[in-house]
């Protein structure tokens, strides 16, 4: 706590502060609506910002992705919300999250907006307090969509110290969030640069002179023909397309495991490739025995001339994924062509050179992995630190009448 804040508290409210419900410090509450879906006159050519709950992310909203027309304002329950309101999502995946709109906009019916009385409270102070109650609010959600009762939101009790104290708290917390945002941007840029560097080196190391022969994938590998009983499969060794991670980040534990029948079997050192929407670049080098389904291709090395890990790096290259994307079929849900994949051509040097390539890339990959793990951990640590100081700054003794 800053000395300035301590001084203000000592001078203005040494014995505590009064608590008010959110509705008691609100000038007006706004709820939104969704114009009839499919009615083009409410959407096509629209220029009125229309906020949806998925865009409520503890953020300042300066732009939106959806717009509606004047007809929506005239003929439906869509209404303008003035800038600098506190917006709380009350349904869906973001239920309980809050934001501040820095532009006038409209919202769907799953957003509740509060115009704060500036004589009673600083809207940014209220925003930080509502943000601090996110976990509590989320826990109160009901139904499949986690719906929150609007009366519950309006009834949140908020400590309201004198305005100079609120503004000093806002200054401290805004500075903290700004520093955290800057750090996040810097670390994310660093990670992106390292990944690009890694991809560059992989492509360089997989490129050889004319003396190194080309082979088609079908000459050194095949798709798995093995089957495994689903009784042998668990969450950690079942791989569906949903738990393969995009951008070549491996896999996560599966949320689904088939309980009966058989699955395609994969072995240690097999290569699993997501075959739906190949532009997502899902690939994993297996370190165990397990099972998968028809949406995942299991590539097994069949020739001693190719090292399985070298083959993985070939199939994880940008060159392969661009080839796979170009040969995919379907518009809405494109799939890779199994036949075309097996015709993919790449250079195959001696096994000694293959292992040198593998060792070099594995070492580089470890550095990138360390950064990939470290950056979210650092960001998380900053968020935990912010949460601690925010909760400390927003905690006051309540003056009881």
Image (cartoon, rainbow, N blue to C red):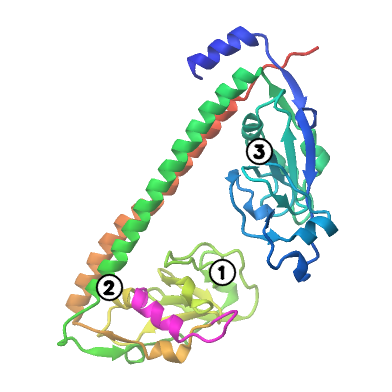
Binning the other alpha carbons within 10 Å of mark 2 as few (below 14), some (14 to 19) or many (20 upward) gives: some
Q: Secondary structure at mark 1?
A: loop
**Labels 2 and 3 touching (C-beta < 8 A):** no
> CA gap, disc 2 to disc 3?
49 Å
Q: Which residues are magenta?
A: 315-334
- The picture places residue 340, in percent across and down from the top left corner, at 43, 90
Q: Secondary structure at mark 2?
A: helix
Relative to residue 26, is residue 74 depicted above or below?
A: below
> CA gap, disc 3 to disc 1?
39 Å
> CA gap, disc 2 to disc 1?
27 Å
Screen quadrant of the C terminus: top right
Q: Nearer the viewer, mark 2 or mark 1?
A: 2
Query: Residue at 17% across / 76% down in the picture?
Result: 352
Q: Nearer the viewer, mark 2 or mark 3?
A: 3
Relative to residue 57, is residue 269 depicted above or below?
A: below
* Mark drawn on residue 84: 3
Residue highlighted by disc 2: 203
Q: Earlier in the sequence, mark 2 or mark 3?
A: 3
Residue highlighted by disc 1: 242
Left or right: 243, with 36 as reference point = left
Binning the other alpha carbons within 10 Å of mark 1 as few (below 14), some (14 to 19) or many (20 upward) gives: some
- The picture places residue 180, in percent across and down from the top left corner, at 46, 39
291 within the magenta span: no
- The picture places residue 315, in percent across and down from the top left corner, at 36, 77
Relative to residue 174, is residue 108 depicted above or below?
A: below
């Amino acid at each position: 706590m800053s000395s300035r804040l301590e001084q203000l508290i000592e001078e203005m409210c040494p014995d505590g502060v009064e608590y008010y419900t959110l509705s008691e410090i609100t000038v007006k509450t706004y709820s939104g609506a969704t114009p009839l879906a499919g009615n083009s006159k409410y959407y096509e050519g629209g220029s009125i910002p229309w906020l949806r709950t998925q865009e409520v992310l503890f953020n300042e909203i300066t732009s939106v992705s959806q717009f509606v027309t004047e007809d929506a304002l005239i003929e439906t329950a869509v209404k303008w919300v003035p800038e600098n309101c506190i917006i709380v999502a009350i349904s869906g995946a973001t239920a309980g999250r809050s934001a501040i709109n820095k532009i006038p906009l409209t919202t769907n019916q799953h957003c509740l907006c509060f115009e704060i009385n500036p004589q009673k409270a600083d809207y940014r102070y209220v925003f930080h307090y509502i943000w601090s109650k996110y976990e509590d609010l989320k826990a109160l959600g009901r139904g499949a969509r986690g719906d929150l009762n609007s009366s519950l939101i309006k009834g949140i009790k908020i400590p309201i110290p004198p305005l100079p104290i609120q503004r000093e708290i806002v200054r401290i917390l805004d500075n903290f969030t700004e520093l955290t945002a800057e750090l996040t941007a810097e670390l994310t840029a660093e990670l992106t640069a390292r990944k690009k560097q890694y991809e560059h080196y992989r492509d360089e190391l997989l490129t050889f002179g004319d003396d190194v022969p080309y082979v088609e994938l079908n000459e050194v590998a095949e798709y798995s023909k093995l089957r495994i009983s689903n009784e042998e499969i668990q969450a950690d060794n079942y791989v569906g397309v949903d738990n393969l991670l995009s951008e070549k980040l491996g896999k996560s534990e599966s949320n689904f495991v088939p309980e009966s029948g058989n699955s395609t079997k994969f072995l240690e050192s097999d290569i699993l490739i997501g075959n739906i929407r190949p532009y997502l670049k899902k690939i994993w080098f297996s370190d165990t025995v397990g099972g998968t389904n028809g949406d995942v291709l299991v590539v097994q090395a069949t020739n001693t001339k190719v090292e399985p890990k070298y083959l993985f790096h070939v199939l994880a290259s940008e060159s392969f994924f661009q080839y796979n994307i170009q040969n995919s079929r379907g518009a809405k849900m494109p799939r890779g062509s199994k036949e075309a994949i097996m015709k993919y051509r790449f250079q195959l040097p001696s096994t000694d050179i293959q292992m040198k390539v593998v060792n070099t890339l594995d070492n580089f990959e470890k550095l990138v992995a360390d950064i990939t793990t470290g950056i979210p951990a650092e960001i998380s640590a900053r968020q935990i630190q912010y949460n601690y100081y925010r909760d400390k700054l927003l905690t006051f003794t309540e003056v009881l009448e």
